[in-house]
């Protein structure tokens, strides 16, 4: 019916009877290209309200494939969960008296299950291929239903920074879904965002001007709010210009602590489900192509060969420009070894589009035509990475001072391992003479930095002679510490 209305409108436009009248909304949305490019930006409530306006809009939205393909519930008020503990002595939630019969999953996943039940009755749930639940109350049982329930056909799921998630249970569900004896074409889920940060919300519009009678009292607040808004906008633009994470933005990509078991889960799901992180490729891991070609640090000597989730995206070594295991290169590395990139794609529900980095303005991708990075875990960059300038030194170019004894102990029994090393390979990574330490930590709040960055941030006060950090000592200047700057040049510290 919607197509008939569109054809009649198109006929009237061609006949010239309504040349002066602008095309209506139904005529514009009747174009499939415009409809598919518009609907991902609208919340589901707006689409349902539009479908309720007339029969033509309802037929157009419900009968056109792909309208409800992208479902973002982070902006839905009924999906928010602001309730504390379960037992509040009979507190009423959703007009239901809480008692001992309600399960933990029913309580914490209640808002989302109510929404899924509603859209299932409207025959919408089976059309959802991209589901975003960032920051909401999501349980492991709900994720398991999304994996195995036939009514769900989700291909890309985002559960970053969710609440009430039992990660060990989620790992168990993922491993079972990706088992070798799984049914054909299962699981339907192909991409999972779980390690990164949720996408930043859009900046709200600036507040309107205060009334004239409140101008004097609100002038300071308005100025502060305006500058705050401008700085947030400038920061957002600056971040967007840096490019995609992992490939263009170097540094820590995963800030959350990694729960034990995720590395084995990523290995078990390899080739079936992709994540927004990958396994570390450092030479201390047995699955690495460089395993055994570089000495292990003392912290990893006890558990050498174990897997770990990559938390850092690095460039080439500051000395040799490469890495013992090589780079992860988009277009050359197998697609199953590439991380999903944020934000979640709007106009596609495939892992191929979610893992594709955006090209630069000149189409060069910034790294010789192909974007690349080195994925490393925290232990593989410990005392080798500068958290300020993002420089790092690989195991073949730099041996951390004080680790020579541990490396020598590894050379004694490395031939007995099953990694196939021979004598000339062992000699390739014998400890070299260490001249100076490259990474150290000079500030309690700062991470480990190189000496060039330390010289730019750690200063000596010309008044009292004490050392201070210009980043974490609020009120300090390039020449005076925070105490001397606040006391306007007092040169003697009072202990009491």
Image (spheres, rainbow, N blue to C red):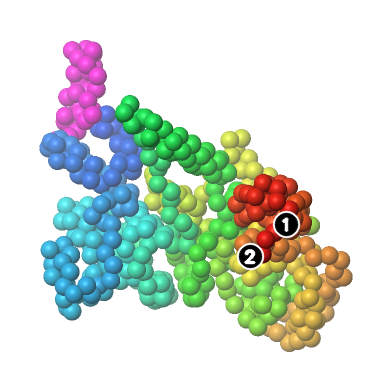
x then y, percent, for residue 475: 61, 49
Location of residue 256 with respect to 341 vertically, above or below: below
Residue at left 41%, top 75%?
168
Residue beneath the point at 14% across and 37% down: 53
Under circle 2, the secondary element is loop
Query: What is the magenta range?
Result: 1-27
Q: Which residue is mark 2?
A: 496
Residue 119 seen in this snapshot: yes
**Residue at 75% from the left image edge and 74% from the top image edge:** 295
Identify the residue position indicated by label 1 in the image. 492
Q: Secondary structure at mark 1?
A: loop
The prevailing secondary structure element of the residues shown in magenta is helix
Q: Quadrant of the C terminus?
A: bottom right
- Is the residue 128 above or below the residue 147 in the image? above
| Closer to us: 58 or 332 | 58
Q: Position of residue 426 (x, y in %)?
A: 80, 77
Q: Is residue 124 rendered magenta in the image?
A: no
| Magenta highlight on residue 24 | yes
- Quarter assignment of residue 172: bottom left
Q: Horizontal and vertical percent for residue 105?
A: 26, 72
Q: Quadrant of the N terminus?
A: top left
């Amino acid at each position: 019916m919607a197509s008939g209305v569109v054809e009649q409108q198109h006929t009237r436009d061609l006949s010239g009877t309504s040349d002066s009248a602008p095309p209506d909304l139904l005529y514009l949305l009747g174009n499939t290209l415009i409809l598919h490019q518009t609907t991902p930006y609208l919340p589901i409530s707006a689409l349902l309200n539009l479908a309720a306006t007339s029969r033509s809009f309802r037929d157009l939205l419900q009968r056109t494939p792909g309208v409800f393909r992208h479902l973002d519930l982070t902006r839905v008020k009924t999906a928010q969960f602001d309730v504390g503990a379960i037992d509040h002595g009979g507190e009423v939630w959703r007009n239901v008296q809480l008692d001992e019969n309600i399960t933990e999953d029913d309580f914490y996943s209640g808002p989302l299950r109510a929404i899924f039940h509603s859209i299932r009755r409207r025959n919408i749930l089976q059309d959802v291929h991209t589901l975003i639940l960032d920051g909401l109350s999501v349980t492991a049982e709900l994720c398991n239903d999304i994996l195995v329930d036939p009514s769900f056909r989700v291909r890309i799921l985002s559960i970053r920074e969710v609440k009430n998630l039992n990660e060990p249970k989620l790992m168990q569900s993922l491993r079972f879904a990706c088992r070798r004896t799984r049914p054909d074409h299962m699981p339907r889920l192909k991409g999972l965002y779980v390690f990164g940060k949720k996408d930043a919300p859009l900046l709200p519009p600036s507040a309107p001007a205060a009334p004239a009678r409140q101008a004097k009292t609100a002038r300071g607040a308005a100025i502060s709010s305006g500058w705050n808004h401008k700085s947030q906008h400038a920061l957002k633009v600056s971040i967007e210009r840096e490019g995609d994470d992992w490939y263009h933005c170097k540094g820590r990509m995963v800030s959350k602590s990694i729960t034990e078991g995720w590395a084995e889960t990523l290995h078990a799901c390899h080739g079936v489900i992709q994540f927004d992180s990958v396994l570390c490729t450092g030479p201390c891991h047995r699955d690495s192509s460089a395993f055994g070609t570089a000495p292990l640090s003392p912290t990893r000597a006890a558990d050498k060969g174990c897997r770990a989730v990559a938390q850092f995206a690095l460039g080439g070594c500051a000395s040799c420009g490469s890495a013992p295991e090589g780079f992860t290169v988009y277009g050359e590395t197998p697609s199953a070894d590439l991380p999903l990139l944020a934000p979640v794609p709007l106009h596609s529900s495939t892992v191929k589009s979610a893992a594709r980095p955006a090209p630069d303005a000149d189409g060069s991708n910034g790294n010789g035509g192909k974007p690349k990075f080195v994925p490393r875990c925290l232990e593989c960059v410990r005392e080798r990475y500068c958290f300020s300038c993002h420089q790092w030194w690989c195991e073949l170019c730099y041996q951390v001072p004080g680790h020579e004894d541990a490396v020598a102990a590894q050379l004694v029994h490395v031939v007995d391992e099953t990694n196939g090393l021979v004598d000339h390979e062992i000699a390739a990574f014998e400890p070299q003479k260490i001249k100076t330490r490259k990474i150290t930590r000079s500030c309690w709040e700062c991470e480990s930095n190189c000496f060039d960055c330390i010289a730019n941030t750690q200063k000596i006060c010309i008044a009292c002679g004490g050392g201070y950090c210009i980043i974490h000592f609020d009120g300090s200047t390039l020449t005076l510490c925070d105490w001397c700057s606040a006391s306007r040049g007092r040169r003697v510290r009072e202990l009491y």
